[in-house]
Amino acid sequence: MALDYFGQQTSNSDDNTGTQQQLSFFWGKSFACPGSGSRTVEELSALCWKMTGATIPKIRGGIWTTAGVLVGESDEVSVDGTASPGTWQGGMSAAAIRPKGGSLGDAVTITGGTSYLLGVAETNLGALGMRYQSGGSSGDVKYQFSVDYSAGLPDIPESLGNNWTGWWNVRCGLTQQTTDLNIHASECVGSNSIFG
């Protein structure tokens, strides 16, 4: 199923690679949800890979309002693959995502035209490789180390975490928005109409 995406999606030759071998949490940089009205989240993922020969890392993706209130999060998943630039991994279907306080598979809905924060946590001591785009401003992204979010992600008040300038490649996928075509029979009646 094709999805609409928003987030830090680029993977250019000037992107950087970062590695973590500890419990960590990165979030920030607001992105506008495309479209309008209610949108259903189908994917929360990061562009990542497992470092060669290392313990398999696990990650959990999340989406927050710009006030730092958790909207939804993915299940904790193991990261596959050992080569940079990696692949998009995480909660890859609505069945692997839950709203705050809900169960996996419960619908996570956000609003088109509204901005949200995206982030990802490494939830075990595996060696995680991720891509990020440099050149941001201090505070665009924040991070924490030595935090265990294997049971779930938190709300993120502005005072939480340390400032950083890199934009980790994280994204949110949405059910594609379609335009309804409402055709009234009265508008189709005529000599060339199938209605006579």
Image (tube, grey):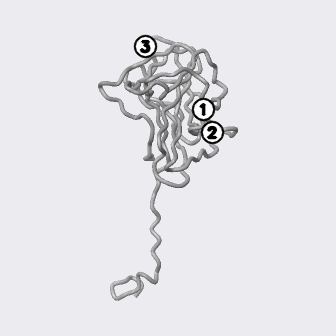
Q: What residue is disc 2 on? A: 98
Disc 1 residue type (three-letter): Asp
Is 164 or 191 nearer to us in this picture?
A: 164
**How many discs appear?**
3
Q: What is the secondary structure assignment of the residue under circle 3?
A: loop
Disc 3 residue type (three-letter): Thr
Q: What is the secondary structure assignment of the residue under circle 2?
A: strand
Is residue 23 left or right of 36 when viewed as pictured? right
**Viewport quadrant of the C terminus:** bottom left
Q: What residue is disc 3 on? A: 52
Q: CB under 8 Å between callouts 2 and 3? A: no
Is 47 or 24 nearer to us in this picture?
A: 24
Is 10 or 60 nearer to us in this picture?
A: 10
Q: CA distance from mark 3 to mark 1?
A: 24 Å
Disc 2 packing (10 Å; few <14; some 14–19; many ≥20): many
Is residue 35 left or right of 70 when viewed as pictured? left
Q: What residue is disc 1 on? A: 75
Q: Position of residue 60 (x, y in %)?
A: 57, 28
Q: Which of pointers 1 and 2 lies earlier in the amino acid sequence?
A: 1
Q: Position of residue 176 (x, y in %)?
A: 46, 51
Is 8 or 41 nearer to us in this picture?
A: 8
